[in-house]
Image (cartoon, helix red, strand yellow):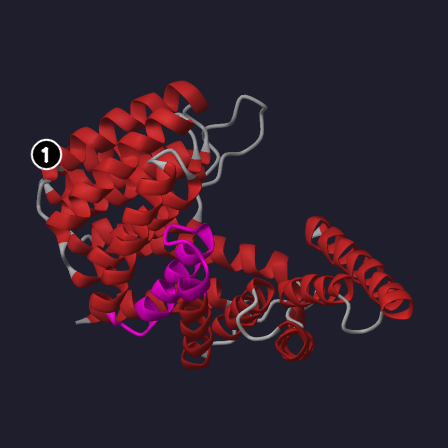
Amino acid sequence: MSSCSNNKVHFDEGVSLIKNAIDGYTEVFGADNEATLQAKQILGQIYPTFGHFHEASLLLETGLDTRVAKLGEEHLETTISMETFATLLMNQSEPEQAKELYLRALEIREKTLPDNDPFIVESETDLMKVYLTQFRFEKAEILGLDALEKCTRAFGHNNSFTFFVMKLLVETYEKQCEWAKAKDLSKQYLNLARGLFGIEHDKTIDGTKSLVFICMHLEHLQEAEEVQGEFLLALTRRLGEDHPEVLDMRTRLAEIYDLQGRKTDVEEIASQLLDIHNGTSASEEGGPIQLDDGSLWRLAQIYTRQEHWEKAMKFLTMAFETAKKKIWARSQVDRGLYPGAGGGFRDARRRACGLSYWNMR
């Protein structure tokens, strides 16, 4: 709770500083000066962090209109304003309006910039995200393949743009249920991430989870187990067996064992994790080790598939209580500042109600 309070204090201090800068720039240089517009754009990007979408929308839309009037629609800074405003619209669940701005920015950049310019790739990936939310997967795939080709040609594989595009393209294939394509690209992504960032980096962890998920959908369970097991051993050596990511990976391995019908192995992992969560085990620092609600929910799913209702309900109740504590701590700062707060709580409650229903059938 104190962390959230500190964040709110820093937010207020930052807003105050930027507003002072805007007033100073406006007085000295004028309201349409680039320094003034840049400061307003930064403030417009910060406002949504604590739910001030209306104020952000006014700033960004006004800034875009000013740049169009002063610099012209085809200026690079104008397209940046278009993309910034479009991103806010996406966050406000207005993808159609966002799409029009992203499309216009892409058209201008393709017309005025070199073919493999990073700004063009940025526009393509932003538009990809819109198409994914609209279930227009073929359009997203076309943009993703083009962006990946441009990134690889311009920067090689060892570039943040390339990684980001690969991840989006894997997500696109997953949503299309194009599992073979997703697997090939996911393997490339994971191998690059391991070599560049190391075993414990977020990109490597995400890449491993993605590949295992894809292998499970393809029913390549032996390969899923090998990838998961190898990675779990390496991650445990690097981070220690009490690390949250290690504990989460163990529940994912249990899920693979369940699909293979290895109930004894599932029970061994679940029993160990239950001891950890109930406080039988402790971290090296002496404090309690807690599983997150996602790991607990995964164990509940396993026992639901096995129709072991008592254990399923036990893990689901723990997941529900863990999610509730997490959301409660966040909401103590100010519920109005977290428009998405409570989602985890509601989701856990829906899961509990759903499982209770199936249990009674």
Q: Residue at x 54, y 34 (%)?
A: 288
Residue 169 vertical position relative to residue 104 in the rendered view, above or below = above
Identify which amino acid the numbered label 1 is placed on: Gln
Q: Is residue 200 left or right of residue 360?
A: right
**How many marks on residues?**
1
The dominant secondary structure in magenta is helix
- Please say whether residue 10 is one of the residues in the magenta stretch: no
Relative to the observer, which residue lies in front, 8 or 309? 8
Q: Residue at x 29, y 38 (%)?
A: 189
Q: Is residue 152 left or right of residue 342?
A: left
Relative to the observer, which residue lies in front, 128 or 341? 128
Displayed quadrant of residue 65: bottom right
Residue 198, percent across and down? 40, 25
Residue 162, percent across and down? 36, 43
Secondary element type, mark 1: helix
Residue highlighted by disc 1: 222
- Please say whether residue 113 is one of the residues in the magenta stretch: yes
Q: Residue at x 10, y 48 (%)?
A: 218
The magenta segment: 109-136
Residue 40, percent across and down? 73, 67
Q: Is residue 308 left or right of residue 41?
A: left
Displayed quadrant of residue 173: bottom left
